[in-house]
Image (tube, rainbow, N blue to C red):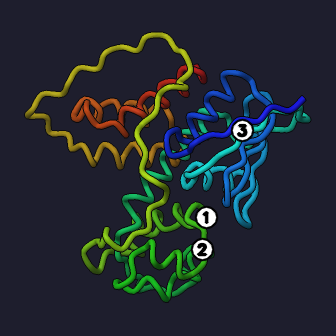
């Protein structure tokens, strides 16, 4: 038996749809127009396709980029191994999206041989010239954001890639259409403790905490990431992106515990 529902991904994001699928234990597929498909079994993502990518990279690319029209198809499926536990997948997708928004407008340069860079960055090297934004370089090279993002971040952190000009945010193609934070399909969870608002004279820097939290997420150190983002949320309790990531990290760590 097959049931199909149309979804406006401008009003609801992919992670919220997948959270609904997880909470209901749905099997089938989420088809995203002109982009790709997420295959589901018992509420978990078991495969994905996006352009020439498949598997986990494709699933993360869809979480980063999907907008427009979606179609949720409920049908019987064969059991398969999950690509990544659902909540971890949501967190990783949010982390990549946040990191890309920070990195995309930067104009980086490299003064090293190609051999010193990650293999995936080789096609980008001629375009990392301090003139092109990272977004322009990735698109001109025909690279996939999800496949080169962590390698670019590693290069920046190692000092192999560095800023040669001011960022140019006006020269960045949006990763996906901007949308409101949608919590309608959040899984039910126990009440969360209230986090005290940090004192105004706190020495902690909001953006430093976010950067440290992202680094912890890249290392799959979810408990450390949660503590850091809680402190960032205390500094800016009205930041909706931080609040959304905090909620999902709490769900992830509570499920693991």
N-terminal-most mark, 3 or 2? 3
- Please tell me whether mark 1 or mark 3 is closer to you in this view: 3
- Residue at x 35% of width, y 85% of height: 131
Residue 143, numbered label = 2
- Please tell me whether mark 1 sits on a helix, a strand or a loop: helix
- Please tell me whether mark 3 or mark 2 is closer to you in this view: 3
**Is the residue under label 2 in contact with that under label 1 (CB below 8 Å)?**
yes
Query: As drawn, which residue projects farthest toward the top?
Result: 190
- Residue at x 45% of width, y 72% of height: 135
N-terminal-most mark, 1 or 3? 3
Residue 188's x, y, as percent? 54, 15
Q: Which residue is mark 3?
A: 72
Residue 46 placement, left or right of 187: right
Q: Which residue is mark 1?
A: 147
Task: From this view, report whether residue 85 is shown above or below residue 53.
Answer: above
- Please tell me whether mark 2 sits on a helix, a strand or a loop: loop
Of residues 254 and 171, the one nearer the viewer is: 171
Q: How far apart are the two marked residues, 3 and 2, measured between alpha carbons?
A: 28 Å
- Please tell me whether mark 1 or mark 2 is closer to you in this view: 2
- Residue at x 36% of width, y 14% of height: 193
Residue 33 placement, left or right of 94: right
């Amino acid at each position: 038996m097959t049931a199909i529902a149309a979804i406006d991904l401008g009003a609801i994001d992919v992670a919220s749809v997948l959270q609904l699928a997880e909470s209901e234990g749905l099997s089938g597929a989420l088809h995203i127009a002109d982009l790709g498909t997420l295959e589901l079994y018992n509420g978990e993502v078991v495969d994905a396709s996006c352009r020439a990518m498949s598997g986990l990279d494709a699933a993360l690319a869809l979480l980063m980029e999907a907008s427009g029209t979606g179609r949720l198809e409920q049908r019987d499926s064969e059991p398969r191994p999950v690509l990544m536990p659902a909540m971890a997948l949501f967190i990783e997708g949010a982390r990549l999206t946040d990191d890309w928004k920070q990195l995309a407008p930067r104009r980086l340069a490299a003064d090293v041989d190609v051999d010193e860079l990650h293999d995936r960055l080789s096609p980008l090297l001629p375009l990392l010239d301090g003139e092109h934004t990272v977004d322009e370089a990735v698109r001109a090279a025909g690279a996939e954001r999800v496949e080169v993002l962590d390698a670019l971040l590693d290069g920046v952190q190692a000092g192999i890639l560095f800023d040669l000009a001011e960022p140019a945010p006006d020269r960045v193609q949006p990763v996906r259409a901007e949308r409101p934070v949608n919590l309608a399909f959040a899984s039910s969870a126990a009440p969360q403790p209230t986090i005290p608002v940090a004192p105004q004279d706190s020495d902690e820097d909001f953006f430093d905490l976010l950067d440290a939290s992202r680094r912890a997420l890249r290392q799959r150190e979810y408990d450390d990431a949660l503590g850091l983002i809680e402190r960032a949320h205390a500094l800016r309790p009205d930041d909706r992106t931080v609040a959304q990531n905090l909620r999902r990290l709490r769900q992830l760590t509570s499920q693991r515990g």
